[in-house]
Amino acid sequence: MAWEPVIGLECHLQVRTNTKMFCGCPVAFGDEPNTHTCPVCLGLPGALPRVNAAAIDAAVSLGLALGCDVRSESVFARKNYFYPDMPKNYQVTQYDRPLCEGGALPAVVDGALRRFALTRIHCEEDAGKSFHPERHGDVRISRVEFNRAGTPLLEMVTEPVLRSPAECTAFLLSLRRLVRWLGLSDGDMEKAQLRCDANVSLRPAGTPGLGVKTEIKNLNSIKGVERGVAAEIARQAALLDEGGAVVQATLLYDADHDRLAVMRTKEDAHDYRYFPEPDLPVLRLEAGRLDAARAALPELPWAREERFASAYGLPGYDAAVLTEARDLSDYFEACAREADAKLASNWIMVEVLRVLKERGWSLARWAERVPPERLRAFLSKVGTKALPGPLAKQVFAWMADEDGTPDELLARHGVRVQASADDLRPLVRRVLEEHPEAVAQFLEGKGVTFGFLVGRVMKASGGQAVPQVVQALLREELAARGAGS
Ligand SMILES: [Zn+2]
């Protein structure tokens, strides 16, 4: 039977804040273990939490960017469960009245724009970390580290609207681009700044119902999500084809061996005994704060991508590459102003991005070396053929290495672009004298030798001649010889 996968994603995003979700402990990674803790994040009796306004602002920005309904009143709740790295024995999260509901994330799949509906986005706190087991002499011990306990997280849950592993990848790439664009997080899955669980079920293709789902955890890269979901689809399809039944369960994906293992049969919501957090008041957002957040939203990446294609006439591929990061798209616009946009796009996509990759530079570092007005001056010379191809590459390389405008660099390196007819006429005449057979062939009507002669002159000029000028001069000189013969 043909099965249709039904996939929902649950993403946890670590947002960039200075302090933890409910206390003043700094959010810092890689420091000495258990140095950023206090009575609140250690869950000591009597300690009272206070909500981190920056984390709420981050959730509101993300919600507004995705078109969610942002509640003016939302409620924190306790999710009760025991885990050694969670000192309170409950997690403060949101349950039946989350901050954001609805909305959708746009993403391009196979060249077509899809909008993936969201269920909700809410704020919560992260757990600490366990390291286990380690062998110490004769005993095996586990260690817990609480620096991360209480770090702000945004949880985003999709509706079961994804239909393939490739759609999961497109979704996560789009989400990562957005959170970077908004400056909320680096969204790096390998660094656990973005974590993702996937709910997977199958149903007979073309039917509306939902099959029994499983949840895959431990997906710690975008590739891992794609492969883990694909493995689970294959596992369920084989099971169903044999007449078996899928059992609701939580699975772990082992990316190194491309294997799934059942971790536990799934808890239901009632297992967590949610109840409203008694130590925190209802979270109220004033209308003014929402309006300010809405006004502060930048042009969103997908809107800018579309505008780059329509306003600058760029191919979809260029528009997507240039809007992968907000600073890159800003840099492109600053360079493309009053310039040939496709030319600017080509040089930025190919040459600038190559330099960034090779040198491990940030775009900010590049823009310090080559500010937009300097690249614009360069592009204008390339566009008007005042810088012939090979020389353009050389000037670009100098720009990457040294400070200076294209004109300053040409002067510094003693290069005088041979652009005028006066500069080039002697060279053209010399080449014609050196190749009498080619001249004769051209005069007999063999056009192909013209290209050969252009090439000889360009070579003789060391790539500094402007091809259009060379062609015009050659035509003139050959015409004179034709008339004289
Ligand atoms: Zn603390």
Image (tube, grey):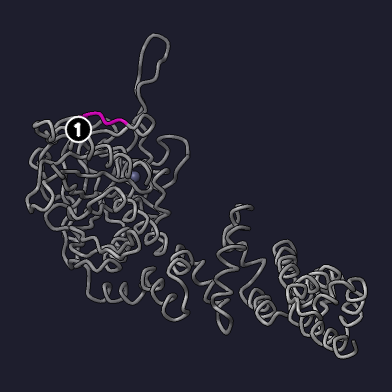
Q: Is residue 21 visible?
A: no
Magenta segment, principal secondary structure?
Answer: strand
Left-right relation of 391 to 307: right
Magenta stretch encompasses residue 468: no
Q: Which residues are magenta?
A: 259-263
Q: Nearer the viewer, residue 442 or 360?
A: 442
Task: Count neighbours of disc 1 (C-alpha within 10 A) and say few if under 14, some if 14 to 19, many if 20 or more.
Answer: few
Query: Which residue is disc 1 drawn over?
Result: 82
**Where is residue 115 shown, x and y percent of the image?**
25, 64
**Where is residue 172 shown, x and y percent of the image?**
34, 53
Q: Is residue 455 above or below residue 361?
A: below
- Disc 1, ligand 1: is the CB inside 8 Å? no
* Residue at the image point whose x is 47% and y is 40% from the top: 30
**Where is residue 62 shown, x and y percent of the image?**
30, 63
Q: Is residue 469 above or below residue 9?
A: below
Q: Nearer the viewer, residue 236 or 172?
A: 236
Quadrant placement of the C terminus: bottom right
**Where is residue 204 shown, x and y percent of the image?**
11, 46
Magenta stretch encompasses residue 261: yes
